[in-house]
Amino acid sequence: MKIKYIPAFLIALSLLILGSCRPKQQVDSIIYNAVIYTVDDAFSTAEAIAIKDGRFLAVGNEDEILARFAANRSVDAGGKFIYPGFNDGHSHFLGYGLSVTTWADLVGTSSFDEVVERVVRHYKAYPSEWVMGRGWDQNDWEETAFPTKDQLDDAFQNIPVVLRRIDGHALIANSEAMKRADVTIKSRVEGGEILIENGELTGVFIDNAMRLITRVIPSPSEDDRISAMKVAEKNCFASGLTTVTDAGLNKSDIFLLDSLHQSGELNIRVYAMMSPIDENFEHFFSAGPLKTGKLTVSSVKLYIDGALGSRGALLLEPYSDDPGNNGLQMHSEEYYQEICKDAYNAGFQVNTHAIGDSGNRIMLGTYAMYLKGKNDRRWRVEHVQVVNPDDLKFFREYNIIPSVQSTHCTSDMYWADERLGEERIKHAYAYNDLLAQNGWLINGTDFPVEDISPLKTFYAAVARKDLEGWPENGFHMENAISRDDALRSITLWPAKGSFEESFKGSIEVGKAADFVILEKDIMTISEIEIPFVQVTATYLGGNKVFPVK
Ligand SMILES: [Zn+2]
């Protein structure tokens, strides 16, 4: 019998049967039963993801993903909340690791007595040739003047001690350290200050002057640096970070990082800026940018000024609480021009530390000389703390990207108005104004200057309050940013700031499967809860990296 025609309903039925019998596609893992903030263009949410070979293969609705895919590992997220892996756009990964493993932690001390006590305790636990510490901040003490070396000399006579201020722009050394560094009352340094009282060195060195001391400190051994990076990675994963920036590394540290990536001893993705040292320029400007998937090197870090806390930030008008002092410029304008020119020609991004309004003005003008107009070089200004409103247009006209740290705002808000005065403070930490220029900005912590947690960054960006919820109505709330933008600023936008937005930064098909699962939804819970939300799990390239058994 010849079949003349097949009834339509039979075709439909057979297609349905064939369809449902179609074997499911095998993937490495499926995560389902979640609220997933994809941070795609539409800022859409999803319920499930399928992962294969370290990338997102599908993102969408739970029924559809469970029907289409079979997984070696299926994870019921229990209705929890998933975000792209957090990316810290400005931090000091190695420095943080070293600060945890070798330096006395002086953050949160309430007096210089307490600093000395902690250093003595640290030395007992970790004896070393030089005693190092980091994190003191005289603005937190009852006596807010800079400390002097005397108490350190009493506690450590023949042992050199060097303690860095929280912002890394000042240090205090004891007499033994100054003796080993051959520093005398006659020593001078351009772009730096050596504090002297009653004709005697106080032990405090600011900005470039710190080098007089730091140049004689033996550098950490390779083993020290390896263990520092491993500790740093562990703490980053526990905080939900899958990428960090290291805002200033030397060639040898970059190669060490790369070798640890190659051997699988280190997995966190790193965007490394090279420190402004000839040896680094000579190598990378001729070799060109480096990109391994785990490590990208395509930028130069420069410094124009110091920090606001130690009055090293370069201001157009003197400090409101120190008339006659405009802060410090680290190098001549020609120095910046020369490096910008070389970096531009070699295809490198320039990322300059600029805090004061004068520092920002000089760097914006220097960038403009080479960028010439609209461009996609993504040159960045790091910190951008005080910007004269007349200069905002540079960001827009030359596509210069602001790279901010929201917790700097909430750490400095107690005293920043004294330094800057009523008028200038309105144009400080002006994240909303900065965001408006290009429609995106980069957020980070500058850890170990601030706490490592990206949730604290998110909270500070939207609430502009400290962890106690002070001030009640937020600090200059006209410059708070929305939760959507705050999430972008710690995920997609820092990826864009390192030219990697097509590879990571959002939960979209084809991108690296870097994501974090949180206990609560930071997009909807009350503000004050945000910084305390627990990280349930962190995944990097589809592998769970926190918690690990
Ligand atoms: Zn920094």
Image: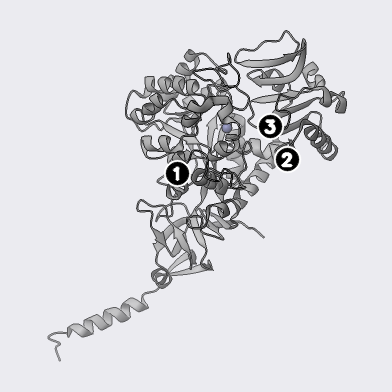
Q: Quadrant of the N terminus?
A: bottom left
Tell me which numbered mark, 1 or 3, is placed earlier along the sequence. Answer: 3
What is the secondary structure assignment of the residue under circle 1?
A: loop
Q: Amino acid at mark 2?
A: Thr
**Residue 484 horizontal/vertical position (percent):** 43, 50
Query: Which tag is nearer the camera, tag 3 or tag 2?
Result: 3
Q: Amino acid at mark 3?
A: Asp
Q: Amino acid at mark 1?
A: Ile
Judging by the rendered image, the residue that carries numbered circle 2 is: 101
> In screen coordinates, is 450 left or right of 214?
left
The tag on residue 137 is 3
Q: Badge 1: how crowded within 10 Å, few (<14), some, or many (20+)?
A: many
Residue depicted at x 38% and y 54%: 43
Distance from label 3 to label 2 (Cα)? 20 Å
Q: Are marks 1 and 2 in contact (CB under 8 Å)?
A: no
Residue depicted at x 44% and y 65%: 47
**Residue 477 horizontal/vertical position (percent):** 47, 41
Q: Are marks 3 and 2 in contact (CB under 8 Å)?
A: no
Residue depicted at x 35% and y 31%: 396
The tag on residue 481 is 1
Query: Which tag is nearer the camera, tag 1 or tag 2?
Result: 1
Q: Badge 2: how crowded within 10 Å, few (<14), some, or many (20+)?
A: some
**Residue 544 horizontal/vertical position (percent):** 57, 58
Nearer to me, 42 or 24:
42
What is the secondary structure assignment of the residue under circle 2?
A: helix
Q: Quadrant of residue 7?
A: bottom left
Tell me which numbered mark, 3 or 2, is placed earlier along the sequence. Answer: 2
Q: Badge 3: how crowded within 10 Å, few (<14), some, or many (20+)?
A: many
